[in-house]
């Protein structure tokens, strides 16, 4: 597989017009994560109410892979309980690292399959998810 | 300049089925056969520890190691070979001055003047020292064109004991006016340390003419192996400095109660040094002298002019820095494509560029770009490689633009 194949249309579309990006004024939790080696950064904010991720927003500076991953992640997880989101995090991580099947609720993120071939880029795809992990640990 | 490409075996390899176009020379340079052979020969014929044995091999290894020091001294026009301290790289050279000189002679409130364009290796050692002994750091600002703002140099130099700055920028390409800054610094009694990492391969370096007190550089950016570099320092200053590491080779005599230190440069070369690498550095310097640094500088100017003509033809490309005095280092952004994606795509075409913050995050902030792409050339690059870069940039742009419709 070539690098070009990694950049599926869906990924480029999300990267250019990311969903749920921006500030979240009523956020209950915010975390900042950076990939020190490349300088990619994300600020992920959440409104958590009664154990549910009522809303998620982020501001990020990063490559197409990390931006698309944040866009698709928030789109899939908004409205989920924290417990379900934790299960999704585990599923996505296993999908990238152990090449296991992705939970059907994360269907769209399947587009990131090509990233597995490029170990240096896995951390790009995981950046938003690592921020999510911190949020889940909080409250 | 004669055809030098065949001196570098790696330049004839392919990447993803395409001829390698190596444009990451600011990160590290490629190595000519002369250097590779010198390492090979050393391990086949001469390998032994230096300064320690009376047998034939040790004497030969010591002679070769000290010969390399003489070559490097001549290369930067040092007054004497003992002014060359072998270190691992630029980073270690800069840290050596911070530990060996600044920690000893500076006190709380003394000002160290740096610049906003510095590599992390010329910022972090000073942060560490500030936290330990309370020195004050001040930074010269960078103008929009990538030159240093020297409009109020005299005011910036008030209370300054040390000025430390880069000869040439690894991001903007800017070549700084070392002599001018050094003269102004000396006028207020400050010492001058120059980070020569990007300077040494771009032009003839004469430390006396530059007027600095120390000059640090890495061998690996100078066609030599990794793990070897040099700190040149005026001998009286080296003599006044404390050692950084203690151990074998750096002492005059050791008793249980204490030890006395050897003279420079041995004082700063504790333990078994990077012998083969130093010899490799000597071979690299010989190789570069056989071409001529003035020739190399002229070749760089030709390549720079060509790149400055071609790169702006790519729509959406923004170059960082447009200093009139500059080397062949071009950091840029391309609208709509993150530098990491660009670098990954270009790799498919066999083109090696760097993407990221280039270890100069404060400078990135200054220009409002947390990450950029960087193509950096060396004298063995050719204009056709700039053409290949431009074509690939156009292709990447097209691929990313097509999604929008
Ligand atoms: C301007 C500048 N200074 C310092 C360094 C550090 O060099 P090294 O990593 O070899 O110590 C580099 C290269 O990375 C550089 O470009």
Image: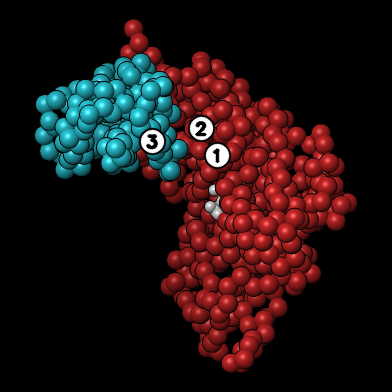
**Colour of chain A in the image:** cyan
Name above or below for residue B30 compared with residue B84.
Answer: above
**Colour of chain B in the image:** red
Residue B40 left/right relative to B331: left
Whole-percent x, y for residue B390 in the image: 48, 23
Label 1 neighbourhood size at 10 Å, few (<14), some (14-19), many (20+)?
many
Chain on which label 3 sits: A
Whole-percent x, y for residue B179 in the image: 80, 47
Q: Is mark 3 within 8 Å of ligand 1?
A: no
Residue B145 left/right relative to B42: right
Q: In which quarter of the image is residue B241?
A: bottom right
Residue indicated by mark 3: A31
**In this view of the protein, which residue sits in the foreground, A77 or B391?**
A77
Residue indicated by mark 2: B370
Please tell me whether mark 3 or mark 1 is closer to you in this view: 3
The secondary element bearing badge 3 is classed as strand
Q: Do the residues labelled 2 and 3 touch (CB within 8 Å)?
A: no
Residue indicated by mark 1: B361
Q: Are marks 1 and 2 in contact (CB under 8 Å)?
A: yes
The secondary element bearing badge 1 is classed as helix
Chain on which label 1 sits: B
Q: Which residue is drawn at 19% across and 29% down?
A: A81
- CA separation in Å, label 1 and label 2: 7 Å
């Amino acid at each position: 597989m070539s690098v070009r194949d990694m950049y599926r249309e869906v990924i480029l579309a999300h990267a250019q017009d990311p969903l749920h990006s921006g500030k979240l004024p009523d956020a209950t939790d915010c975390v900042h994560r950076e990939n020190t080696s490349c300088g990619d950064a994300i600020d992920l904010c959440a409104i958590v109410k009664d154990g549910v991720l009522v809303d998620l927003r982020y501001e990020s500076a990063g490559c197409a892979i990390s931006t698309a991953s944040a866009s698709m992640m928030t789109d899939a997880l908004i409205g989920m309980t924290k417990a379900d989101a934790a299960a999704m995090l585990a599923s996505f991580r296993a999908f990238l690292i152990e090449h296991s099947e992705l939970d059907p609720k994360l269907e769209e993120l399947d587009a990131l399959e090509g990233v597995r071939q490029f170990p240096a880029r896995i951390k790009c795809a995981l950046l938003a998810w690592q921020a999510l992990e911190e949020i889940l640990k909080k409250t | 300049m004669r055809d030098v490409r065949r001196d570098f075996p790696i330049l004839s390899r392919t990447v993803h089925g395409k001829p390698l176009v190596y444009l990451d020379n600011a990160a590290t340079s490629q190595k000519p056969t002369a250097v590779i052979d010198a390492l090979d020969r050393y391990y086949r014929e001469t390998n032994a520890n230096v300064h320690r044995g009376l047998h034939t091999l040790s004497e030969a290894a010591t002679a070769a190691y000290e010969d390399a020091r003489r070559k490097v001294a001549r290369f930067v026009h040092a007054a004497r070979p003992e002014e060359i301290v072998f270190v691992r790289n630029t980073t270690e050279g800069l840290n050596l001055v911070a530990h060996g000189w600044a920690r000893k002679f500076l006190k709380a409130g003394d000002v160290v003047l740096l610049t906003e364009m510095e590599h992390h290796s010329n910022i972090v050692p000073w942060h560490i020292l500030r936290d330990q002994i309370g020195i004050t750091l001040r930074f010269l600002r960078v103008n929009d064109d990538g030159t240093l703002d020297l409009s109020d140099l005299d005011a910036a130099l008030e209370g300054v004991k040390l000025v430390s700055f880069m000869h040439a920028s690894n991001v903007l390409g800017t070549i700084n006016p070392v002599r001018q800054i050094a003269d102004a610094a000396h006028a207020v009694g400050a010492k001058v340390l120059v980070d020569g990492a990007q300077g040494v391969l771009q032009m003839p370096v004469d430390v006396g003419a530059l007027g600095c007190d120390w000059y640090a550089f890495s061998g690996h950016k100078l066609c030599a192996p990794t793990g070897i570099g040099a700190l040149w320092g005026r001998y009286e200053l080296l003599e006044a400095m404390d050692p950084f590491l203690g151990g074998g080779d750096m002492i005059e005599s050791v008793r249980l109660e204490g030890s006395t230190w050897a003279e420079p440069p041995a004082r700063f070369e504790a333990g078994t040094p990077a012998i083969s690498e130093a010899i490799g550095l000597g071979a690299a310097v010989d190789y570069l002298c056989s071409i001529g640094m003035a020739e190399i500088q002229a070749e760089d100017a030709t390549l720079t002019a060509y790149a400055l003509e071609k790169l702006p033809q790519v729509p959406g490309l923004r170059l960082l820095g447009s200093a009139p005095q500059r080397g062949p280092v071009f950091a840029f952004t391309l609208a709509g494509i993150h530098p990491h994606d660009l670098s990954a795509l270009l790799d498919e075409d066999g083109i090696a560029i760097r993407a990221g913050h280039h270890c100069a995050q404060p400078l990135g902030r200054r220009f409002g770009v947390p990450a950029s792409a960087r193509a950096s050339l060396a004298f063995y690059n050719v204009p056709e490689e700039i053409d290949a870069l431009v074509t690939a940039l156009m292709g990447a742009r097209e691929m990313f633009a097509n999604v929008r419709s």
